[in-house]
Image (spheres, rainbow, N blue to C red):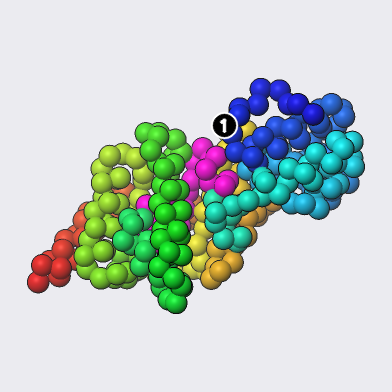
């Protein structure tokens, strides 16, 4: 089975999604009609076709049966499912790489896309205190590789709200924090990202239960991702995504303005630098 306009440099999931679209159209089915026997929404099928969602093996088997593709999706599902990220985060990381906009609330840590190598190493070591050094090296390398998303001057639009606790928690000590915050400041001043700080004075807020990431795409429905300790869940249900979007909007309303946020980050960075020199 050959698909139309395939990009050989695309990811396995993107290629698998393109093949799915061709097979579905060949069968004369809409996305909603194909989703019915799989008990998923038409938007879910659209996300599979766009490569923003991972195709699991049970779906691959059913798709081969429904679309008469002679085992194509089962054979290729394993390669497309491989990821260098933990299972609970893999789907979100891969969707993130295709997003047009990313909006994130970070309650405890500088967002992964914005971390320095030293900061990321401290975080990974804290998660896995007894891991071999080569394991930590690989985790840090993979985390920093995600930041390549920001090498494009405009896409994706990245807007984050960070809790004041992110600034005050001295991950790795003064030197590591000073470097991490200066990196954040440089991205803001280069107009590459938008950052707002949610101050302690804001009190209770709409996302007190954990982190939140919202992603929108040019050719697929939006997604919301929430993460806990070693767990994460990606949502595509429109009602759930709308609920999380409202939560993020409320966060931005309660956070400091981007200008005041930058001033606070700079002030805290100076405090770490003074501490480091002292």
Q: Tell me if residue 169 comes above or below residue 192 in the rendering.
A: below
Q: Is residue 99 magenta?
A: yes
Image-based side of 166 in relation to 132, left or right: left
The quadrant the N terminus occupies is: top right
Image-based side of 262 in relation to 214, left or right: left
Residue furthest out toward the top: 5
Residue at the (59%, 52%) spot, across then down = 83
The answer to which of 188 and 123 lies nearer the viewer is: 123
Q: Is residue 197 visible?
A: no
Q: How many residues crowd around disc 1 within 10 Å: few (fewer than 14), some, or many (20 or more)?
A: few
Residue at the (41%, 73%) spot, across then down = 126
Q: Tell me if residue 16 comes above or below residue 228 in the rendering.
A: above
The quadrant the C terminus occupies is: bottom left
Q: Position of residue 208 (x, y in %)?
A: 49, 68
Image-based side of 162 in relation to 43, left or right: left
Image-based side of 152 in relation to 69, left or right: left
Residue at the (53%, 71%) spot, across then down = 229
Residue at the (37%, 34%) spot, across then down = 153
Q: Which residue is mark 1?
A: 9
Q: Tell me if residue 177 comes above or below residue 240 in the rendering.
A: below
Span shown in magenta: 94-114
């Amino acid at each position: 089975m050959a698909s139309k306009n395939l990009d050989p440099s695309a990811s396995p999931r993107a290629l698998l999604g393109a093949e799915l679209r061709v097979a579905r159209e060949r069968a004369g089915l809409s996305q909603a009609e194909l989703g019915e026997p799989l008990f998923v929404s038409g938007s879910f099928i659209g996300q599979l076709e766009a490569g923003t969602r991972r195709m699991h093996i049970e779906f691959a088997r059913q798709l081969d049966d429904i679309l008469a593709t002679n085992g194509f999706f089962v054979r290729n599902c394993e390669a497309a499912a491989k990821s260098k990220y933990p299972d609970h985060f893999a789907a979100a990381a891969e969707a993130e790489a295709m997003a047009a906009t990313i909006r994130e609330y970070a309650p405890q840590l500088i967002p992964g896309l914005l971390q320095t190598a030293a900061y990321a190493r401290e975080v990974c070591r804290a998660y896995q205190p007894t891991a071999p050094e080569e394991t930590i090296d690989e985790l840090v390398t993979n985390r920093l590789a995600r930041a390549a998303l920001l090498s494009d001057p405009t896409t994706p639009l990245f807007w984050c709200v960070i809790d004041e606790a992110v600034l005050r928690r001295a991950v790795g000590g003064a030197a590591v924090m000073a470097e991490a915050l200066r990196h954040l400041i440089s991205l803001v001043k280069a107009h590459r990202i938008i950052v707002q700080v949610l101050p302690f004075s804001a009190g209770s807020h709409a996302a007190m239960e954990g982190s939140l990431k919202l992603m929108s795409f040019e050719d697929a429905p939006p997604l919301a991702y929430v993460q806990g300790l070693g767990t994460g869940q990606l949502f595509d249900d429109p009602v759930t995504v709308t609920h999380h979007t409202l939560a993020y909007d409320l966060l931005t309303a309660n956070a400091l303005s981007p200008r005041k946020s930058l001033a606070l980050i700079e002030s805290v960075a100076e405090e770490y630098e003074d501490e480091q020199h002292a």
